[in-house]
Image (cartoon, coloured by chain):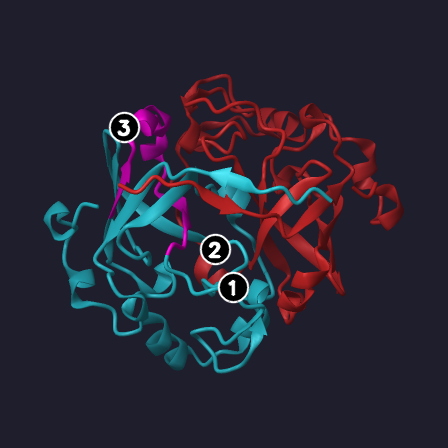
Chain colours: A cyan, B red
Amino acid sequence: MNIADIVYRPIGVIHSAHTRAEQTPIQPVFAEGCPGRVDLLPEFAAGLKDLEGFSHIYLLYHLHRAPPPRLLVMPFLQDVEHGIFATRTPCRPNPIGMSIVRLLRVNGGTLEVEGIDVLDGTPLLDIKPYAARFDHIVSARNGWLDGLDEADAQARGRRQTASSCSTSLSTNQFGDS
Amino acid sequence: MNIADIVYRPIGVIHSAHTRAEQTPIQPVFAEGCPGRVDLLPEFAAGLKDLEGFSHIYLLYHLHRAPPPRLLVMPFLQDVEHGIFATRTPCRPNPIGMSIVRLLRVNGGTLEVEGIDVLDGTPLLDIKPYAARFDHIVSARNGWLDGLDEADAQARGRRQTASSCSTSLSTNQFGDS
């Protein structure tokens, strides 16, 4: 098996109002209304052509502030230990994060998005369109997530989301990196 | 903006009956019945605990045979040029592939999966559970994909899928790398 290193380079940076990991919603579904901005490096802006036709996009990013990898973790939503690959917890062997966010607007190399659960300053690796044709899975079994108490999951998922998440999108609230 | 290199290391390898890029289905939805096997490196097997409760999983992998990056591409499903980020075409700035596949079985560090649209020998980067709670998006606009002719898309998507894809899963049909 070839286990040579794989080298990627950020194509941009994700901006959000989330500056503290412990207050960042754990998934977009718990980050409703949280505005975000994705700044692509200028040389990649041409790759955004026709993206605006999609209401939702995947962001793939490097979890740059993830703790060191662990194979067994206690996810945010439950006080039970699971294998890292059965969770979305950041401390993964390869700390690649994935979020499905709503795409509001494309301005040149900048995307305005909503439902952002990503720390401010996170390096962006890739953008893919969300396509119901490919990504809408019916009747999936959802493992340990199926057994969660809904009210408890809601409370844990939001993790005292910063109040800024309920405000409208303003580019001024994001620091540039 | 910090554009330092990001280094990942494969955690395993994906095996499939697809050995030629031009005959590989372009998405799991066009690879129904295609069996696959994911071999994790032994040191990561413990991270699979409780994954078997999920009927579907995301595989994130390195598109190791992708052509050099291009910003405007003609996707497999349509003879119209789109920005690379509005498609799932492999020749991306960071060639990270993503597939949602059906998880059939976990045996130690080996996953048996179905609906595989990945080339045999592809280096695996991460596994995440598919969770309807997080990933089921309702009423998405799907850009240029919404306008496709269904019969044409089906024909293009399968790309003369190798007949082996309709057979049942057998570990013998995969070469070890």
Evaluate if marks 3 and 2 touch, with contact meaning CB atoms under 8 Å apart: no
Q: Residue at label 3?
A: A42
**Subunit ID for the residue under disc 2:** A
Label 1 chain ID: A
Q: Viewer-proximal residue, B93 or B158?
A: B93
Label 3 and label 1: CA atoms lie apart by: 33 Å
Residue B136: where, in percent of width, then height? 47, 56
Mark number displayed over residue B142: none
Q: Which residue is mark 1?
A: A69
Label 2 belongs to which residue?
A95
Q: Secondary structure at mark 3?
A: helix
Q: Hey, which quadrant is residue B26 in on the image?
A: top right
Task: Check the image and name the residue furthest to the right.
Answer: B172
Q: Earlier in the sequence, mark 3 or mark 2?
A: 3
Magenta region = A37-64
The label nearer to you, 3 versus 1, is 1
Residue plotted at (50% across, 17% down): B79
Residue for point 44% across, 52% down: A98
Instruction: Report the amino acid beneath label 1.
Output: Pro
Q: Are marks 1 and 2 in contact (CB under 8 Å)?
A: yes
> Foreground residue, B151 or B45?
B45
Amino acid identity at mark 3:
Pro
**Residue displayed at 66% across by 39% down:** B118
Report crowding for label 1: few under 14, some 14 to 19, many 20 or more residues within 10 A (C-alpha).
some
Q: Please say whether residue A33 is one of the residues in the magenta stretch.
A: no
**Callout 3: chain:** A
Q: Is residue B162 above or below residue B3?
A: above
- Quote the CA–CA distance across marks 3 and 2: 25 Å
